[in-house]
Image (cartoon, rainbow, N blue to C red):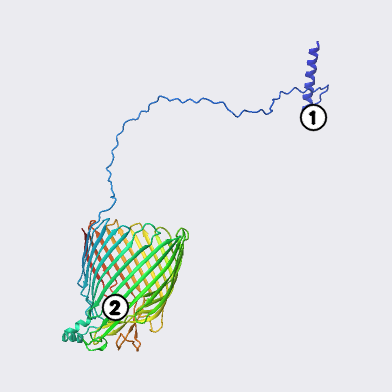
């Protein structure tokens, strides 16, 4: 045997023994000399090497593939489209006429006629007639009428507007504030001339002139000067001539706005009483009551306005030469601040002024006055107010306010008998203080629905009079408008006045003199007056309307013994030409 064979047999024997030993005890026994050897490792050199940041330019090639898209031809039908072309300026009609007729023999006629558009001038005419046979039961004849003619002309020249206006107004009322009985009807039939004592006419003829600047440069003195004259009289012979000149001047100066208001008000009044008022023999004259005087006022002010604030400070200076000449000073100030881009705007202010009470202004407020009321001018001593206005959104706006005020010689109206029959009203003057809380809200949903509401709660204090005669402690006014595609328009208005106190002289003396006997207090109930108006626009030029007033058909009294008509219904049409 050679050496290789011997080594092979020896290795086989050792392996067999080792396997046997593992199978028996899990141990390996190798006998011999062991010489471990480590082989050489082949390692990579990973040392950092610098890389040049300048990369070589690689040419870019754009290839256009000659591919042609195949689009199959397809014909679609298109529906006809209606184009609504809006003209830059809509067409204006020069004329507008409105006519109607209602219950209680109530005709209505109204006409507007204007020049339409012009760069050089503008003129127009307005005529209106409204009358009624009255129709009230259990009271005297209650006929009334209203006639008005009003025309104007404006001329536009370089940087100015010059205009004039003519006015004529005639109103007729009836003194129906008494119980209609058979004995009174017999007295009227026996003395037909006594009918003149139960009605009153008021005629008003006036004209006005105005010149107003149209400067674009705010550093120039902007001015607005107006003159208005009225000749006013009644059936009993009382008459008044009033001339009122006003001027508003303003100029920008170093970021501020300087302003000055000028007032010259001259009034000549002559009151006459020729009927049987207050127990006098009918047609006996009580003589003339003359009141003349001039009221001059200056109202300087300075205004500063920023992005979020507005401040105006001024004063009112007045000289009143009616009767005994007197001087009056009133502070005027106003400030507001905008929060959150006009979402909330708090404001504060104080105002005061001297006011003219004329024969025309008193009879416009209460047409059932006696023929020759006494005239005294009033002073709003102060009106301190503060509030918060704003917008919850682009559709909802609001304004809440609280104020404290006092007015010297505020006119109040009391009732008195007119001889044998018919009640009339006289005016008394007193210092009246008031505390007022008011709130107003408006809502607009596009042009479809609009809503507005206002509430006033007022507490009054008087010095000489027992009560603030005929002044309501609270008032509520609501209004809504609904438009259906601008074809059918519905308007709803509601007015509520709280209970009031009325004064009644059972046996008065001449009302132009002081009344020593206090009046008897009468209670006037609160009332709710609902008005509903419907209009259907058949075309842009022709429409029909239906108006319903006093839907509750309540016979309430706005003044003592002077109830209103129950449920007035009137229908008619309008036409533009």
- Name which of mark 1 and mark 2 comes first in the sequence: 1
Residue at the spot 28% in from the left edge and 60% down from the top edge: 489
Q: Are marks 1 and 2 in contact (CB under 8 Å)?
A: no
Residue at mark 1 to residue at mark 2: CA–CA distance: 146 Å
Q: Is residue 352 visible?
A: no
- Numbered label attached to residue 268: 2
Q: Is residue 449 visible?
A: yes
Mark 2 lies on a secondary structure that is strand
Report crowding for label 1: few under 14, some 14 to 19, many 20 or more residues within 10 A (C-alpha).
few
Q: Quadrant of residue 361?
A: bottom left
| Residue 227 image offset from top left, x and y in percent | 30, 69
Residue at the spot 24% in from the left edge and 77% down from the top edge: 233
Q: Is residue 25 left or right of residue 58?
A: right
Q: Is residue 418 above or below residue 170?
A: below
Q: Is residue 427 left or right of residue 136?
A: right
Q: Is residue 38 above or below residue 294?
A: above
Most foreground residue, 274 or 459? 274
| Residue 566 image offset from top left, x and y in percent | 26, 74
Residue at the spot 58% in from the left edge and 27% down from the top edge: 55
Q: Quadrant of residue 64?
A: top left
Circle nearer the viewer, 1 or 2: 2
Query: The N terminus is located in which quarter?
Result: top right
Most foreground residue, 322 or 361? 322
Residue marked by disc 1 = 25
| Residue 204 image offset from top left, x and y in percent | 25, 73
| Residue 6 image offset from top left, x and y in percent | 80, 14
């Amino acid at each position: 045997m050679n050496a290789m064979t011997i080594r092979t047999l020896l290795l086989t024997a050792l392996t067999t023994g080792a396997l046997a030993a593992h199978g028996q005890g899990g141990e390996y026994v190798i006998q011999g000399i062991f010489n471990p050897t480590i082989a050489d490792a082949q390692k990579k050199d990973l040392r950092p090497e610098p890389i040049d940041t300048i990369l070589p330019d690689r040419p870019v090639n754009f290839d256009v593939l000659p591919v042609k898209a195949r689009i199959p031809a397809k014909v679609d039908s298109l529906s006809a489209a209606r184009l609504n072309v809006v003209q830059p300026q809509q067409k204006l009609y020069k004329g507008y006429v409105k006519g109607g007729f209602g219950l209680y023999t109530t005709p209505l006629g109204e006409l507007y006629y204007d020049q339409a558009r012009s760069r050089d001038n503008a003129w127009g005419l307005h005529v209106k007639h409204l009358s009624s046979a009255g129709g009230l039961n259990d009271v005297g004849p209650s006929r009334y009428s209203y006639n008005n003619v009003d025309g104007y002309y404006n001329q536009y020249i370089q940087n100015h507007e010059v205009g004039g206006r003519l006015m004529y107004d005639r109103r007729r009322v009836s003194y129906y504030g008494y119980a209609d009985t058979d004995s009174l009807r017999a007295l009227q039939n026996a003395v037909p001339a006594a009918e003149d004592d139960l009605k009153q006419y008021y005629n008003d003829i006036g004209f006005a002139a105005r010149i107003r600047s149209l400067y674009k440069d705010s550093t120039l003195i902007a001015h607005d000067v107006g003159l208005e004259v009225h000749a006013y009289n009644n059936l009993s012979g009382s008459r008044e001539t009033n001339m009122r000149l006003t001027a508003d001047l303003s100029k920008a100066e170093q970021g501020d706005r300087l302003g000055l208001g000028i007032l010259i008000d001259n009034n000549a009044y002559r009151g006459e009483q020729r009927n049987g008022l207050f127990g006098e023999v009918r047609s006996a004259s009580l003589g003339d009551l003359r009141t003349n005087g001039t009221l001059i006022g200056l109202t300087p002010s300075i205004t500063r306005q920023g992005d979020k604030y507005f401040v105006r400070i001024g004063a009112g200076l007045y000289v009143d030469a009616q009767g005994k000449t007197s001087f009056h000073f009133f502070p005027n100030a106003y400030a507001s601040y905008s929060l959150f881009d006009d979402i909330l705007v708090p404001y504060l202010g104080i105002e005061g002024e001297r006011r003219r009470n004329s024969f025309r202004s008193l009879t416009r407020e209460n047409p059932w006055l006696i023929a020759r009321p006494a005239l005294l001018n009033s002073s709003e001593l102060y009106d301190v107010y503060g509030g918060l206005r704003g917008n919850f959104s682009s559709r909802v706006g609001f304004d809440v306010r609280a104020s404290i005020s006092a007015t010297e010689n505020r006119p109040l109206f009391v009732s008195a008998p007119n001889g044998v029959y018919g009640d009339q009203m006289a005016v008394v003057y007193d210092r009246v203080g008031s505390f007022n809380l008011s709130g107003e809200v408006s809502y607009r949903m596009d042009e479809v629905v609009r809503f507005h509401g206002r509430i006033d709660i007022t507490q009054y204090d008087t010095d000489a009079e027992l009560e603030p005669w005929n002044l309501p402690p609270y008032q509520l006014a609501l209004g809504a408008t609904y438009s259906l595609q601008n074809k059918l328009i519905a308007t709803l208005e509601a007015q509520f006045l709280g209970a009031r106190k009325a004064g009644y002289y059972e046996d008065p003396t001449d009302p132009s003199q002081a009344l020593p006997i206090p009046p008897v207090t009468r209670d006037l109930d609160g009332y709710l007056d609902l008005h509903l108006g419907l209009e259907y626009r058949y075309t842009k030029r022709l429409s029909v309307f239906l108006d319903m007033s006093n839907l509750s058909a309540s016979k309430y009294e706005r003044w003592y013994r002077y109830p209103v008509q129950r449920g007035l219904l009137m229908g008619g049409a309008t036409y533009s030409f």
